[in-house]
Structures are given as structure tokens and as C-alpha cells.
Image (tube, grey):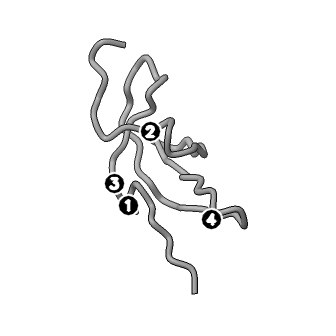
Amino acid sequence: MMVIDAEFDFGEMVYLKTDKDQSPRMVVCIMVYKAGELIYKLVCGTTESSHYGFELSREINVLI
């Protein structure tokens, strides 16, 4: 049995560290790969995108 320790949860609002607009995105899917890597699928409006956990933050970056 495999235990998945995801840093972010389904439905959680997160921000892309590199997004200059700091638009909130919702976690809608967590993909688990054989090597144990997690990819988070995010939705912002009608746009979906996939990202590694290190690209995401729970906090908005007002300095960007």
C-alpha cells in the first residue's frame, strides 16, 4: 500500500510563485507518478495548468 503525502489538498486555493498577477488557483487534481512525484492540476477561471509543488504557495506574494 502506498501513502501519498500531498503538500496541498483538493479545493485548496494556491498561488504560483512566478505569476506576476498572483491570481488564485484551485487544486482540482493530484497526479501521482511511479517515481512518487506529485503534479498538481490547478484551475484559474477556465484555464487549467499543471505544476510541481515547489512552484506553489499558500501565501500571496505582494512583492512580485
According to the picture, the residue beneath numbered tag 1 turns out to be: 9
Query: Looking at the picture, which amino acid does disc 2 mark?
Result: Leu
- Secondary element at tag 1: loop
Q: Are marks 1 and 2 in contact (CB under 8 Å)?
A: no
Q: Which of marks 1 and 4 is nearer the N terminus?
A: 1
Q: Do the residues labelled 1 and 4 touch (CB within 8 Å)?
A: no
Between residue 5 and residue 51, name the one nearer to us: 5
According to the picture, the residue beneath numbered tag 3 turns out to be: 12
Quadrant of the snapshot with the C terminus: top left
- How packed is label 3: few (under 14 Cα within 10 Å), some, or many (20 or more)? few
For the point 53% across and 61% down, which residue is it? 29
Between the C-alphas of marks 3 and 1, the distance is: 5 Å
x and y percentages locating residue 1 in the rendered image? 58, 87
According to the picture, the residue beneath numbered tag 2 turns out to be: 56
- Judged by depth in the image, the label closer to the viewer, 4 or 3, is 4
Between the C-alphas of marks 1 and 4, the distance is: 13 Å
Q: Earlier in the sequence, mark 2 or mark 3?
A: 3
- Secondary element at tag 2: strand
- Secondary element at tag 4: strand
Decide: is 5 above or below 3: above
